[in-house]
Amino acid sequence: MAASSEQWWIGAETGILKGLDLVKRTTTNFTDFKTLNKQQEIHVMCWGPQGKDQLELDLGKNVKKMKQHKEKSNIIATGGKENELKVYDLEKPDQPIFLAKNVRHNFLDLRVPVWINDMQFLSGESNKIVTCTAHHQVRLYDLNTPQRRPVLDVEFQDCPIMALDVTPDQRSVIVGNAQGQLGRIDFRNGIYSKNYKGFAGSIRSVQCHPTLPLVGTCGLDRFFRLHHLRTGKMEKKVYLKSRLNCFLYTDRDHTEDLLVKEKEDAKEEERKVEEKEEGGESDDELWQGMEEVADDTEGTSKRRKNSEA
């Protein structure tokens, strides 16, 4: 594996942002532990340009996930608990350009509940999107057709599916569930074709490498793992101490970011020292201005003599 393929950003449940270098076998924390707060838990990460305007959308209640199209940055998808899949064009955000329709009632004529946990757009001109649910369903939607129901609807094991990602060849999807099971499902026939082993807890994030036949995973067992897509062999396994929620691949060396962070911290310390010196007296001036207190040695000696007598 090339060195540039082994740089990863990982977000933890404790709010810690970690940089992982699999070549040097090092991890770097980019979070100040003094200000660590459980409410700052990292749920999702993505790459994006700086200096963009903020946009607020009313997506309804219980939104669980939002994903941006990898090639069309103005297209996003959302979904959640009893919040059906919606696709928006951020240039025309008033109404969704696609609103999915729930599948037909089951064999008991009961409504099938909606609970979307993750989704991913397929690349290229296919204009398709795949979702996974807490009711262990994997569904494929074709946005080019007038049909709003999924064109493929299959089940994976019997536990909630927490995360997924589409393989680079766009022919299958890798899904991971709350029981630590990772599998591969073929879009062409809906068959469960590959099982990846070695997990001990819920899988929270799945991501295929953009150029190499590798799939990365992390979860509540605190391990980051790399498996070979075709053979299923575990290539790497790293213990990261915290319960992990998400991660990102990067071709940039984390040491560059660490140097930048150290320089920023040094400048901040210098600024605080300057503010302290400008706002009040220095330590030397403070000590010099204090009143001297003489010891009462004579009184002490007299008390000693009286006590001896």
Image (cartoon, rainbow, N blue to C red):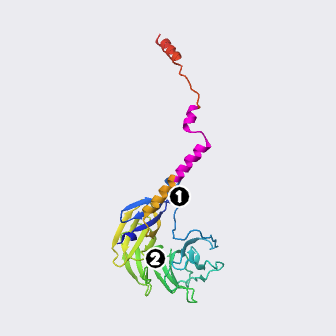
Numbered badge on residue 165: 2
Above or below residue 14? Residue 97 is: below
Q: Residue furthest right?
A: 94
Q: Is residue 272 magenta?
A: yes
Tell me the residue that label 1 is attached to.
38
* Quarter in which the N terminus is drawn: bottom left
The answer to which of marks 2 and 1 sits earlier in the sequence is 1
Mark 2 and mark 1 residues within 8 Å of each other at the beta carbon: no
The three-letter amino acid code for the residue at tag 2 is: Asp
Q: Is residue 178 visible?
A: no
**Along the viewing direction, whichever of 280 and 186 lies nearer the viewer:** 280
Image quarter of residue 288: top right
Image quarter of residue 115: bottom right
Give the Cα separation between the discs numbered 2 and 1.
Answer: 27 Å
Q: Position of residue 304 (x, y in %)?
A: 48, 15
**Along the viewing direction, whichever of 284 and 33 lies nearer the viewer:** 284
The range drawn in magenta is: 267-288
The three-letter amino acid code for the residue at tag 1 is: Lys
